[in-house]
Image: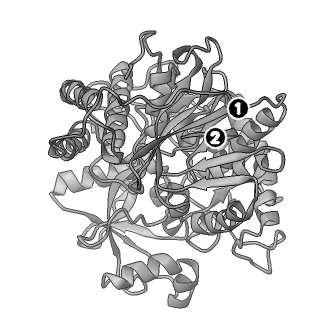
Amino acid sequence: MLKQYDVLILGSGAAGQSMALRLAECLKVALVTKRELSDSASNWAQGGIAAVLDTTDSVEAHIQDTFTAGAGLCDPVATRFVVENGKRAIEWLIDRGVPFTREADSQLGYHLTREGGHSHRRIIHAADATGAAVQTTLSAQVRAHPNIDIYEHHIAIDLVLGDKVGQAGAGCLGAYVLDIKTDKVVTFAARNTVLATGGTGKVYLYTTNPDVATGDGVAMAWRAGCRVANMEFIQFHPTCLYHPQAKSFLISEAVRGEGGLLKLPDGTRFMPEHDPREELAPRDIVARAIDFEMKKRGIDCVYLDISHKPADWLRSHFPNIHARCLELGIDITKEPIPVVPAAHYSCGGIVTDLAARTDVPGLYSVGESAFTGLHGANRLASNSLLECLVFGEAAAQDILAKPRQSPPALPDWDESRVTDADEEVVISHNWAELRRAMWDYVGIVRTTKRLKRAQHRIRLLAREIHEFYSNFRVSNDLIELRNLVVTADLIVACALKRKESRGLHHSRDFPDLLPRARETILRPRRKRERR
């Protein structure tokens, strides 16, 4: 069951697919994804992609907006690198045929919208389903490319390290991957492995993320010996649709950018009391304001009202939001939308450089799984897809610049000492307990007592899950749970180290800013977990 490639890409979002297309002109690429090719957070992205495309805008303004949102923690070099390469990334997508929304009267020929935290209209979009437009376009080209082999319904178990297979110093040599449909473990050998596995949202009870967002890349990289950073900065999207039949459906930032107003059940606005930028404040401020109002007044949700805009305009600018809400009996042209905050984006991740290289040779990380330094303590709206594209290109260039080597020979996955699981209920129970503990104790507003309580619960669960993993054959649910508990522990460990309130991390015990902004970097112990 050995498969050999030049490059192994784990994850099929915008980062993974754009990299695959850039690499496949010269190299043989395996693209591994847990479900279908389109199942990713990129596909769900509504708002758009931020880039300096208009002559009234500037690179310096985009950088400053990113710095302001990032609360003093954005890396200046990484931020400039992303912003300066933004226009080229958009041009690459346009050349690929992505159908961005056009506007005949604009100098660019495309409509640019504005979102919270931005000083200019710089968000290029495809109506209110930009991610789907990008994903659909790239997926068709990935499927058609002869040098890209797609493995759907495959989930990576762990990375293969040279030190563990008798090739000391060789770095990452591929991954062991479970074929979910056959329950067989496949060995993928590659001199270059890319973690494009997305975020960590499913560690929380309520999230806007797809079900595949289980922190797989972060957990695998941590076990492989990579540093992770700033995991405490979890962005809670302020406006997730609140409805018993709606799962993880977010109401785009662009709704507020185009004039949507946040209101209490009695119709009173509340954002003017929380921030001078009102509804256009960065997401962390808006999410905390909503959380404050809900707890203060004992209400289940607040309301986002854009019904004052013309109905035809709303249907053309937000067709998917309009259609989904209408399915649930909410007509956004006539009434406000009930919304609540939900875990949305992880600003931290695996530490990488400007070529997306991690601490392990041959291992790269791009997209939400990576910590590049761009987002700081809070991601500026619509910078994430831009980061995927820019660092995807950088990683591809770094790989293409290397001398081509034959894929290594690797040993098969060893399951000679394990048996079939006898009580699968352990997995579902631990999954529910973990996500509830994270939601209750490591949410929008935190205390040291809550964090320590969460840490204690998580580490008890980790021991139980490790024992289960060591004795029974792997399954999709077990792999995801094992990764979630590692990710949860890293989030709490970072949160406990930060003795201040900055950006997305708000602590009642440390409400003030420290004089100097510092990253929270965790380094794994030398002794790594072994199967």
- Measured along the vertical axis of the image, is residue 36 above or below residue 462? below
Q: Earlier in the sequence, mark 2 or mark 1?
A: 2
- Measured along the vertical axis of the image, is residue 172 above or below residue 272? above
Q: Which residue is mark 1?
A: 407
- Measured along the vertical axis of the image, is residue 274 above or below residue 220? below
Element at badge 2?
Answer: strand
Q: Is residue 402 visible?
A: yes
Q: Is residue 58 visible?
A: no
Q: Quadrant of the C terminus?
A: top left
Instruction: Judge left or right: residue 369 versus residue 493.
Output: right
Q: Looking at the image, which residue is at 78% across and 29% down?
A: 405
Where, by quadrant of the figure, is residue 261 drawn?
Answer: bottom left
Q: Amino acid at mark 2?
A: Leu
Q: Position of residue 212 (x, y in %)?
A: 42, 52
- Measured along the vertical axis of the image, is residue 374 above or below residue 448? below
Instruction: Judge left or right: residue 102 versus residue 496.
Output: right
Q: Looking at the image, which residue is at 27% across and 71% down?
A: 243
For marks 2 and 1, give the CA distance. Answer: 10 Å
**Neighbours of disc 2 within 10 Å: few (<14), some (14-19), many (20+):** many
Image disc number at residue 8: 2
Q: Amino acid at mark 1?
A: Pro
Where, by quadrant of the figure, is residue 244 drawn?
Answer: bottom left
Q: Position of residue 177 (x, y in %)?
A: 48, 41
Q: Looking at the image, which residue is at 39% across and 24% down?
A: 494
